[in-house]
Image (spheres, grey):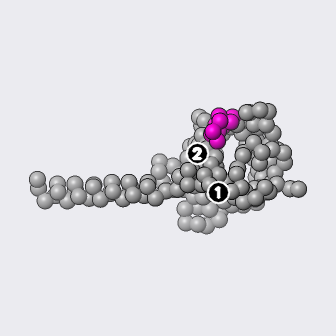
Amino acid sequence: MSQISRRALLLSAAAASVLVLAGCASPQIADYAAEKPLLDLRQYFNGKLEAHGVFRDRNGLVKRRFVVAMDCRWDGEDGVLDEQFVYSDGERQRRVWRLKHLGDGRYSGRADDVVGTAEGTARGNAFRWQYTLRLPVDGKEYDVQFDDWMYLVDDRVMLNHATMSKLGIKLGEVQLSFYRPR
């Protein structure tokens, strides 16, 4: 084996090791199984809620601020989350999620701008939700992946942190605070 081939093999092995170790270090939903209060999406996302959030680019710069008014309801295992977004620049958007409780803390969901089906799992006080969203940007549409984590703080407040990426490259993050009025 030539010196160049050996070096390429070593570099490939090192890169693979880093990826494997990074995958092991990532939080898993099971890590939150013992956390309290227990999150039941059907209970929390039921009725009217409000959320405040920001989108930060990959450098951490806040690019957009927004408020969301939510009207949520469940009929057995089927839920509807009707979200009305108002952005700081005046833009308005609406997303209507149609959710399905699949048992054992698992959920699936669809919305008009979601490509395919969103999949999520709740354990303890946490919920991990993964999906592809079709985003309009400057007259074009882009499919971006969301890795969305929600953490129930108490019966009124839930925090949300989502990482947005395309082809494995991080584009930015969304941070959101859900609030249930009394």
Task: Name the residue tied to disc 2.
Answer: 130
Residue drawn at (55%, 62%) of the image: 58
Work out how far the residue at label 2 is from the one at label 1, CA to CA, in angstroms: 21 Å
Residue drawn at (64%, 57%) of the image: 35
Instruction: Pick the residue in front: 167 or 89.
Output: 167
- Inspect the image, locate mark 1, and give the three-letter code of the amino acid beneath it: Glu
Instruction: Pick the residue in front: 52 or 137.
Output: 52
Task: Name the residue tied to disc 1.
Answer: 35
Q: Which of marks 2 and 1 is in front?
A: 1
Which is the main secondary structure of the residues drawn in magenta? strand
Q: Residue 174: which quarter of the image?
A: bottom right
Span shown in magenta: 100-109
Residue 90 badge: none
Residue 63 in the image: state x and y as whole percent: 65, 62
Residue reaching furthest to the left: 1
Residue 178 in the image: state x and y as whole percent: 75, 56
Answer whether residue 128 is visible to the viewer in this image.
yes
Q: Mark 1: which secondary structure?
A: loop
Q: Mark 2: which secondary structure?
A: strand
C-beta proximity under 8 Å, tags 2 and 1:
no
Question: Mark 1, residues whose alpha carbon is within 10 Å: few (<14), some, or many (≥20)?
Answer: some
